[in-house]
Image (cartoon, coloured by chain):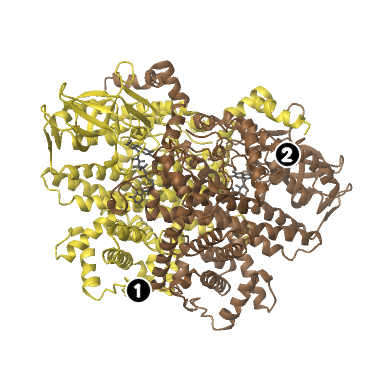
Chain colours: A yellow, B brown
Amino acid sequence: MANMDSTAPSSPRDTSCPVHLNKQMQLLHTARNTASFEPFELACLIYGGADVVGNRRAALERVETLIGTRDTSQIPRSYANMNREQAYDEGLEWGKAAFEDGIRFKHDFFAFVTPRFQLVNSSPFGMNTVMFEPAIRLSASAEQQAKWLPLSKSGKIIGAYVQTELGHGSFVRGIETTATWDSDTDEFVLHSPSTTSTKFWPGALGFSCTHGIVVARLIIRSKDYGPHLFMVQLRSLDDGRPLPGVELGDVGLKMSYNATCNGFATFHQVRIPRTDMLMGHASVSHDGTYEGSSHFTQLSYSTMVMVRAIIVKNVVFQLAQAVTIAARYSTVRTQGMGPNGLASAETCLIMYQSQRLRILTLTAKAYAILFASRTCDAEYDALRKQQANGDHTSLPYVHALSSGLKVWTTQTAADGAEDARKCCGGQGYLAISGLPEIVASVTAATTFEGENYVLCQQVGRYLFKCIDQLMQGKPIDYRMAYLAAGYQKWFAASFAASSGANITPCMAFGKEFLDPNTQLSIYRHRALRTVFKAYTAVRSSTKPPLDAWNENMMSIISAARAHTEYMALSFYIKHVQSLPTATSPALTTVMARLCSLFALSNIINPQTLDAISFVEDTHLSSAQLDTIRGLVNELLDQLAPELIALTDAWDFTDASLCSALGMYDGNVYENVMNWIRQIPMNKRAWEENKGVYQPGWKDWIEPVLKAKL
Amino acid sequence: MANMDSTAPSSPRDTSCPVHLNKQMQLLHTARNTASFEPFELACLIYGGADVVGNRRAALERVETLIGTRDTSQIPRSYANMNREQAYDEGLEWGKAAFEDGIRFKHDFFAFVTPRFQLVNSSPFGMNTVMFEPAIRLSASAEQQAKWLPLSKSGKIIGAYVQTELGHGSFVRGIETTATWDSDTDEFVLHSPSTTSTKFWPGALGFSCTHGIVVARLIIRSKDYGPHLFMVQLRSLDDGRPLPGVELGDVGLKMSYNATCNGFATFHQVRIPRTDMLMGHASVSHDGTYEGSSHFTQLSYSTMVMVRAIIVKNVVFQLAQAVTIAARYSTVRTQGMGPNGLASAETCLIMYQSQRLRILTLTAKAYAILFASRTCDAEYDALRKQQANGDHTSLPYVHALSSGLKVWTTQTAADGAEDARKCCGGQGYLAISGLPEIVASVTAATTFEGENYVLCQQVGRYLFKCIDQLMQGKPIDYRMAYLAAGYQKWFAASFAASSGANITPCMAFGKEFLDPNTQLSIYRHRALRTVFKAYTAVRSSTKPPLDAWNENMMSIISAARAHTEYMALSFYIKHVQSLPTATSPALTTVMARLCSLFALSNIINPQTLDAISFVEDTHLSSAQLDTIRGLVNELLDQLAPELIALTDAWDFTDASLCSALGMYDGNVYENVMNWIRQIPMNKRAWEENKGVYQPGWKDWIEPVLKAKL
Ligand SMILES: Cc1cc2nc3c(=O)[nH]c(=O)nc-3n(C[C@H](O)[C@H](O)[C@H](O)COP(=O)(O)OP(=O)(O)OC[C@H]3O[C@@H](n4cnc5c(N)ncnc54)[C@H](O)[C@@H]3O)c2cc1C
Ligand SMILES: Cc1cc2nc3c(=O)[nH]c(=O)nc-3n(C[C@H](O)[C@H](O)[C@H](O)COP(=O)(O)OP(=O)(O)OC[C@H]3O[C@@H](n4cnc5c(N)ncnc54)[C@H](O)[C@@H]3O)c2cc1C
């Protein structure tokens, strides 16, 4: 049975085998002990030090105790049975606990993620920190900030970020809601002129928020100034009623995130004071004069950069949760007589090379995303400091970086979580495995905050602009030095304009492919080739620019992907090469191998997106690819004993994993049956009706059995 | 508002534009009329004739009317709010209606699929036709068949196929449930010796079935004869109670299929008559003598072939449903100012080349799967006839074919449905889009009835056996002629054993790539290269056979995939080239283009699995790949005007699509808001509480707002 206090122990590791372990528990116990490093050391690296790990554990313990999820012998409520209302109620309960714990104990462990790392629950109280306060900070005047931020931070108001409409998501310029200045009363009048202008999707909007930052077209004396932000009180703080003219409601069941009330809103001539427009970078004075900062657009881009950086950070943990469950299950489940049925006894799933490749490469990807998110955060922080001094020069680079990483990490995590789920066979299809909910929640990130196909093209546009600059002999951002260097080689030399090909075979062989510089050179070559090829095709096209772009859209998207993957690999390598000096040699070796596995497996994995672009110009020969395949096999064998430690290091509690397959004890089959026997339908049938589900039997089954057809 | 009778009209098409259409409805109406062929003609091709299409429509109308789903202005119950019990109740209601309609009107439209094509609902009454009767037909004696089949067909008993256990799914030989012959009473005693032996997963087992065909180890006088099939009554026909010693229950919420009760079962010394073992090919006499047919294994393979053929047929419609929704939505939703923002007005999603590529290639794949399933069915029927005459020689080929197709079609449909969902942006994440349920249900097919990674290796084993035969100078199945021919060329000539490469560049250029023979030669080359390469690597390895297999597992899987894709393309081409003579020239052209799009896009689409294997030996040059990219773009432009007709042709009713985004009228935004306003949470809040969800506000939100922190 699952243990009530099942957090991984801190160093030193307890390696003695407890008595009374059944077969599955023993298998996991043994696999835990084959690692060459202490998971606690890695946990400190992940979370930023032993004190953080400790505080985080304490916070989880408090909150999980309060909301009653810590006793994992009880089936989680959402798996037992739950309708729309109950899911939302649970979200409120959990959200409140997490929100208040953060305030009381002065931490932000749950600021961007919930007690379950967005899993199952995404809190209706969560928008304050994720979007509401950032928008205030970036777009409100100093005075407005001083007024609203304390209210939001202390939960005196509950916010939503209300941008998307039924008719417009990606294309923000197209939104239809109007905020018309009324000179008589010096107010703005908010109005929804059509069905498509219905605000749609904002988290917490349905029934939880009191205020919204509403994006609406600013209209002054019939002149349309385009979308601006307005602070709008939506509900009475006394009784929660929507204010007059405001219609609010829930958008209903979604793939996931059902613990919050993504909502819709319509405005019927709703009046707000003029001073409630966010006036940090644009203002309307009492006589209706509009003044906009020249950096208005840049600043709205900054918000997006920040939110994308948060998304990147979040999906790390969603993918890591899925991988943790799959790794533990694959260690304890035996199935079949080994490869080609040739073993003498049943084999653990993780012994099959396909399973190993899938789970270990996903592990490597989770760490790749973690390190990419570190760089993304650091660049954003640096940008903010520069912007505070009025220097916006870094914005285009950081914006393109965060967009590219958002696309790459969300797609990687979404596809990866689904593959981890499939790795658990039939059991991964059960709600109680925790995996369906993880998969359904992480896949949303490919769509929200910049749909991936839309963002990819923004990265493409940035790359093209860089090359335009280079063509004009102008310098580009120093962090894009590889492109400038490539430009010298590819363009200045003889770039075969027609085919875009410039065949410079990779000269590495054998173990040289384990050298990070070799790996980087392969990714760099692919990025340069695809970027310059797409650029040439678009710029040399004789068609109208719109058609030239459209016709080459897939090449532009490929180029953006190749560029981003090169950047991600370079960040990963950089971080792995600059681990804190105190890092143990064992962990250093494991992290280097994991990074190599990431770099190499991505080339030859059949599931890799656009792998063809690594090889179509014969940069890598068939023999070299086979060498890489061989090295990947070796890395898998070296890393297999480290798998459980690599996943334990994420330090997920059993309550936050919320998975009968993924518990720390490995006691999967008992845990499954224990939870299933608690399902109300089963309990009621057996306690009240000797094993019959009476309504179904009486209403439908008996009539079929007795029908004369 | 959605129309109550929204089935596509039959020929002649109504091309006049009705008045009072809003913008979205007009867009769809217009797009419907750009097609060069009549969708009804294609519908007849899909379903097998005008009479079938008509009967099918009538059956849908009857059943949908009975269960009350035909008025699509009402939000479907499962989207409004539904817990575990309600989902199951709905499954029973629908299942009964479909089952009884089939009996009354003598059709099998719902035999393998439900009124929603397995979407949302998978009937608890459905196992009779899908697995229970086939198992009886294939494994029971003539006498047993005569007894049980009529009972099952008329619904006098309700069956489940009870094979999988908690501990064993893929590896059937490992199951633990025992059926021990008791010489005293001439009975079998069924028993579950462990937690892992709990029967787990069978559809309808939880609360619906009365009987199960239970797979258990046959034990006679302590001798273990391995898994055999037993007919076991599980519940009383009078009151539905589980018989003594039988524990039955539901496995709880799943990703999808919640309208049926996949269940678990344990047996505590449950006695059944000896004569209830299925004795078609193995028997136990009253003195305990065991006699097994020499074809015992072959015959159990036959069941799997049949079930896999059914799966292939089902996923066609699941993918087609997802594509229909995405195609319609992409036609009516406008978003953004066109490619690179260069258009003068907002653009329909389908104008973006990436969206076009995604949706049209998915359309092409749906038709590819349809035609593959035709061949699969035909081969199975032929096999059954041969087997009836004692000739089992076709079995290995047909088994490998159905296994390969099962893997390829389920993965294609699962990935495709998710991509179609993503094509609808945020709205595709709403339950009312219908897409989350389709995605969640189709992905199960990659796991059940032979997990895909397991099946791939079986295909690999078959291919290796064929080559072993060829090596020994023996003939192989005539349908594998391409492999025999390839063997001559690849092996008999100088096959570079080390690299496995045999570089014979493709000589096609320009429009030649539109030639089906060229396309086939590319797929054939890839199949031969990967198959012979994997074979050589495994057979020439110096490692123990188990390690040799494991080390090359990914190559074996690639080879199996390449072989299957070659076969699938050849079937597709064959069917397109032999359409009924009466087929209109317009439709003939469209089908040929769609087939070309399938063949060519699969090579260059960034999402293609293992695309690298098309090019890594430089069979296709970079320039040729660019030619193919250009041709794909042309095909997309040619096919875009046909898209709505290509999806209308599937003839889905609005009720069976069950999607606010995918209705025939195209009135997406009104349909969305109409359904959402009917959600109980919204209705209750507004009708009873002026827009407040009272429990949440009182219990959780007010306390946060008023807290002193
Ligand atoms: C769970 C969830 C939470 C959300 N929370 C909030 C919130 O708190 N506040 C808020 O304001 N909004 C929120 N949203 C809305 C979200 O921001 C939008 O759904 C998202 O921006 C995508 O936009 P869309 O839905 O308009 O997609 P669309 O733009 O309609 O995309 C549909 C399809 O069209 C394609 N497409 C669109 N434009 C182009 C182009 N230029 N080139 C090529 N292809 C194109 C896309 O690739 C996609 O395949 C949320 C959404 C979800 C799912
Ligand atoms: C919706 C649904 C309905 C079902 N209905 C029924 C039913 O009606 N009756 C019934 O009896 N059963 C039913 N099942 C059970 C189903 O048949 C099994 O789940 C399926 O066979 C997969 O087996 P498994 O769960 O043991 O997966 P596992 O074999 O445990 O697979 C888990 C992982 O291990 C890997 N793996 C396993 N073996 C190998 C190998 N040899 N080589 C490489 N990798 C390997 C797989 O690739 C996978 O990644 C149903 C399942 C589902 C999800």
Q: Is residue B97 above or below residue B406?
A: above
* Residue underneath mark 1: A508
Give how far across and how far down residue B387 sits, in percent.
78, 60
Q: Pinpoint the chain carrying mark 2.
A: B
Q: Specify whether tag 2 is near ligand 2 (CB below 8 Å).
A: no
Q: Quadrant of residue A135?
A: top left
- Point out the residue furthest to the front here: B16
Q: Residues within 10 Å of mark 1 (few under 14, many from 20)?
A: some
Q: Is residue B315 visible?
A: no
What is the C-alpha distance between the residues marked 1 and 2?
Answer: 70 Å
Give how far across and how far down residue B375 sits, in percent.
65, 60
Q: Nearer the viewer, mark 1 or mark 2?
A: 2
Q: Quadrant of residue B688?
A: top left
Q: Residues within 10 Å of mark 2 (few under 14, many from 20)?
A: few
Q: Is residue A233 visible?
A: yes
Q: Residue at x 36, y 47 (%)?
A: A316
Number of numbered tags placed on the structure image:
2
* Residue underneath mark 2: B105
